[in-house]
Amino acid sequence: MKENKINKISIIGAGRLGFSIAKGLIKSKQYQPSDIILNRRNVELLKESNSFGFQIEANQQSAIEKSDLIILSIGPKDLKSFFKDNSIEINSSQVLASTIAGVSIHDIEKEYLIANKSIEFSIFRVMPNIAVELCESMTCLSMKNSSDNNDYQRDLMNRKNVLNIFSKLGMVKVIEEELIGAATALCGSGLAFFLRSIRAAAHGGTEIGFHADEALALAAQTAKGAASLVNDSNDHPELQIDKVTTPKGITISGLNEMDHSGFSSAMIHAIVKSAEKLNKIK
Ligand SMILES: NC(=O)c1ccc[n+]([C@@H]2O[C@H](COP(=O)([O-])OP(=O)(O)OC[C@H]3O[C@@H](n4cnc5c(N)ncnc54)[C@H](OP(=O)(O)O)[C@@H]3O)[C@@H](O)[C@H]2O)c1
């Protein structure tokens, strides 16, 4: 079996996430802007924001033909018309990675087969978040189960390449496809939840004496430090929290106030609610 090298990448649906991925691919020094082909229906918008020198291609099929990896980053509701209206054909040496929330590999195959006779390319789901542009994404990746996949070995080989690319755009974890929705809520939407908690901390900082911009910078770096403590030590957060609290101390009084006010519960509810909403997309 021949390994498919990924020299050119097209991003179809280069909106907020797609464009962030393109920027991450450059920042991680894996690709030159000329190796990345961007497409969306309104290409004029891409031209306006293309100070990077990405290739812009108005025709979807032409963009796809030029690429080894196709990152499909359109909205869930755009999928049905995408393959049908654009006579999209993808060949066996190419790989498709979909970021589309709530759309399974099976859904993509189904839509492709309405317009084509057979599928001979690998399809993956990648779920990054917009920190991908800083190479700080938490990306989850999945492929078809071995039980219903006649091309499992081919897909495993292609997954290695996709994994390699996304591992340079932050952290990447391979998960079962049934967990991709949960990953979308925890890591995609979750990014917004953590940003909101940084904003809340900054508001608190302003109330106790810092200018808003200072409070935001202090809160953001503190959040980054907290995340690094967990990531680098692999410790449970409570182990690190125990290092900050003292009997009758100031931190424990703040932590208990957070719990009395329902902080943990609000975060859990937010993640569960997002996951529930995602399940209702179709
Ligand atoms: N944003 C996130 O943090 C995030 C995280 C994980 C997953 N996702 C998923 O990733 C996908 C993109 O999200 P987003 O936030 O980047 O949305 P977005 O900003 O709306 O981008 C989607 C893009 O797809 C383009 N598009 C729609 N139909 C198309 C077609 N037929 N051919 C080519 N381009 C088409 C749209 O542009 P035109 O109208 O100009 O074509 C738009 O720029 C969604 O499915 C979302 O659920 C997003």
Image (tube, helix red, strand yellow):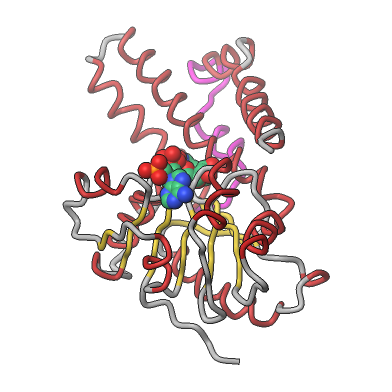
Residue at 67% in and 73% down: 118
Magenta-drawn stretch contains 276: no
In the current view of this chain or complex, which residue is farthest to the left?
Answer: 51
* Residue 92 vs residue 266, the one in the foreground: 92
Q: Does residue 221 appear left or right of residue 89 in this picture?
A: left
Q: Does residue 276 appear left or right of residue 167 in this picture?
A: right
Q: In this picture, is 257 found above or below 156?
A: above
Q: Is residue 224 visible?
A: yes
Q: Position of residue 249 (x, y in %)?
A: 51, 17
Quadrant (top left/top right/bottom left/bottom right) for the C terminus: top right
Residue at 44% in and 75% down: 68
Magenta-drawn stretch contains 242: yes
Q: Where is residue 213 in the image (x, y as percent from the top left)?
A: 23, 22
Q: In which quarter of the image is ligand 1?
A: top left
Quadrant location of residue 67?
bottom left
Q: Can residue 229 be seen in this view?
A: no
Residue at 60% in and 63% down: 124
Q: Position of residue 104 (x, y in %)?
A: 68, 53
Residue at 37% in and 50% down: 40
Q: Does residue 154 appear left or right of residue 207 in this picture?
A: right
Quadrant (top left/top right/bottom left/bottom right) for the N terminus: bottom right
Q: Where is residue 134 in the image (x, y as percent from the top left)?
A: 33, 51
Quadrant location of residue 156?
bottom right
Q: In this picture, is 268 found above or below 203?
A: below
In the current view of this chain or complex, which residue is farthest to the bottom?
Answer: 1
In the current view of this chain or complex, which residue is farthest to the right?
Answer: 147
Provide the residue span drawn in magenta. 232-252
